[in-house]
Image (spheres, helix red, strand yellow):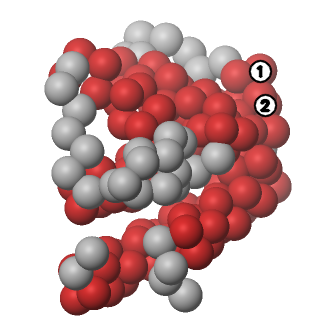
Amino acid sequence: MDKKQLSILTAEINYQILEIDKIISKIDERKRDFTHESRSLESLAYQFHNLYCAFEDLFKMVAKFFENVIEDERRYHIELLKRMMINIEGVRPPLISKELASSLDDFRAFRHFFRHAYSYEIDNKKIGLLIERFEIIKKRYKEDISNFFKLLKID
């Protein structure tokens, strides 16, 4: 692997981690204010949407760098998520664990709903489940990315 290109990837990933951290802080704020009123529900839902988008941007960076092309455009989002949890022998280690991928998959599905839910109410039970999954994501993602860097021999 070209050291210069790997340095660029590392910088991009670290920048994206900062973006994810900003969204996590907003979610933590909104969680404290969470009520079943539509305004706080919508605000939290919007940040959940943003969180998955930020992770997907991270996944795209890694996939692009390692030329992990996803062929099936209809299943692009789920295939990209799955691709990030697998080891591709001779190419790259997994970026995230299966546990993290499972929690992120709930956010992927929610993001799809959120983008297309023009006439639907946001279910506060679903938001409650996502809050639980959010805690897993918050605890795991930096550890997973750190493991990815270690396996690539990046400190």
In the image, residue 82 lies at what x, y percent? Answer: 47, 33
Pick the residue in front: 41 or 143: 143
Query: Does 20 sit above or below residue 149?
Result: above
Q: Residue furthest top?
A: 119
Left or right: 118 in relation to 82: left
Q: Which mark is residue 142?
A: none
Tell me the amino acid under the disc marked 2.
Gly
Left or right: 75 in relation to 29: left
Query: Does 152 sit above or below residue 26?
Result: below
Circles 2 and 1 in contact, beta carbons < 8 Å:
yes
Q: Residue at x 21, y 20 (%)?
A: 72
Q: Which mark is residue 128?
A: 2
Tell me the amino acid under the disc marked 1.
Lys
Q: Quadrant of the C terminus?
A: bottom right
Pick the residue in front: 13 or 116: 13
Q: Residues within 10 Å of mark 1 (few under 14, many from 20)?
A: few
Query: Which residue was labeled with disc 1?
Result: 125
Q: Residue at x 27, y 87 (%)?
A: 3
Q: Quadrant of the N terminus?
A: bottom left
Q: Residue at x 31, y 19 (%)?
A: 75
The number of discs equals 2
The Cα–Cα distance between marks 2 and 1, rounded to whole angstroms, is: 5 Å
Q: Is residue 35 something that shows in the picture?
A: no
Left or right: 148 in relation to 111: right
Q: Residue furthest front?
A: 90
Query: Does 149 sit above or below residue 99?
Result: below
In the image, residue 51 lies at what x, y percent? Answer: 51, 50
In the image, residue 80 lies at what x, y percent? Answer: 37, 36
Secondary structure found at label 1: helix
In the image, residue 39 lies at what x, y percent? Answer: 60, 38
Secondary structure found at label 2: helix
